[in-house]
Amino acid sequence: MPRVLITGITGFAGSHLAEHLLSRGDEVHGLAHEDPPFPNLAAVHTRVRVHRGDITRLEEVGAAFAAADPDGVVHLAGQAVPTLASADPVAAVEVNVLGTATVLTAVAGHPRARLVVASSADVYGAPDHEPVDEDAPLRPENVYAATKVAAEALARELAGRHGAAVIILRPANQNGPRQHPGLAASAFAKQIAAAEAGIADPVVRHGRLDARRDFLDVRDMARAYAAALRLKESATFNVGTGTAVSIAEILDILIALAHVPVRAELDPDRVRSGGAARPLALDTTRFRQKTGWSPRITLAESLRDTLDFWRSSIRQGAVA
């Protein structure tokens, strides 16, 4: 039974990955900075071993590695919301860059373990064409993307210096249950669920809707991380659908799923600065050919499940 250590196991992507790995029979360990309970792990908390530790403290990360003795490591811990990273760049760099360096140092002491590092499609910035492949230049346009470029560089240095197998994945934007409400689809879904429950006005407040991005369900991304753990050589891969979808279309789909009439309203406080947004779709040919992976969950299904998650959460007392 393979042993896998997930940093950030209690988060959005980490909890879904834990569920997937357990479903295929792996022994799952996790690193988390908070104390229980872990709401995102509610369905599997008795089947995972969570080690408490600060991702930036080597002694705490090292203790988790010693306890887990992993065959594979998936590094997901970090600040994943671009607006929050921009609001506190020092904290974002500390967690996303120093945290990655700490994990890499721990991995160096466990040469058997294969490492998968979560980067982001945001590293491409505004590419010259779409779909964009892995050879495109990296043009980070915000703090979050810059931290991911730095984390990638550190991971490649480890691979070169120690000969470790390090797989870097650049995921598309992810949707699905448990997503942070600071991200577009989840923010829209939460507002709709609150309106349905009668605890908020029937209005979905939004920022810019013109951006077109590649969107992937988090459960398909969990399958991608699991597939990457089986790779034996260091490489960098895009993971997405290959199709760019506008934020406006995301909003339209969710409004159509609403159980009560709702209207959309521009909120200036939600508008990010910048010029015209260029589309970003990922060429995932290399990863598909290497692993046989392909997405299974449609955008409509992903958004429906995101909305259902917020309906359930609000019924259970989540703040609108």
Image: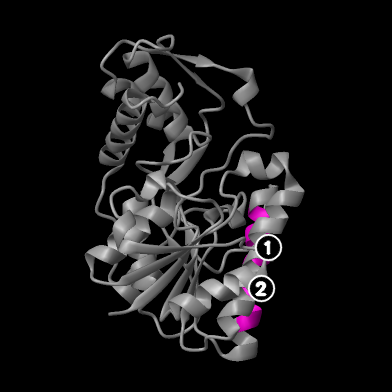
Q: Do we see residue 275 in this rendering?
A: yes
Residue that carries the numbered disc 2 in the rendered image: 154
> Residue 69 versus residue 151: which sits nearer the camera?
69
Left or right, 114 with reference to 107 = left
Q: Quadrant of residue 106?
A: bottom right
Q: Quadrant of residue 295?
A: bottom left
Rounded to the nearest angstrom, the CA distance separating label 2 from label 1 is 8 Å
Q: Is residue 75 above or below residue 251?
A: below
Crowdedness near tag 2: few (<14), some (14–19) or many (≥20) residues, C-alpha within 10 Å: some
Quadrant in which the C terminus appears: top left
Residue bounds of the magenta highlight: 145-158
Q: Residue at x 66, y 73 (%)?
A: 154
Left or right, 4 with reference to 83 = left
- Give how far across and how far down residue 129 sits, in percent: 53, 53
User: What amino acid is labelled 1 in the image?
Assistant: Val
Left or right, 188 with reference to 87 = left
- Give how far across and how far down residue 186 sits, in percent: 43, 34
Evaluate if marks 2 and 1 touch, with contact meaning CB atoms under 8 Å apart.
Answer: yes
> Residue 117 versus residue 127: which sits nearer the camera?
117
Residue that carries the numbered disc 1 in the rendered image: 97
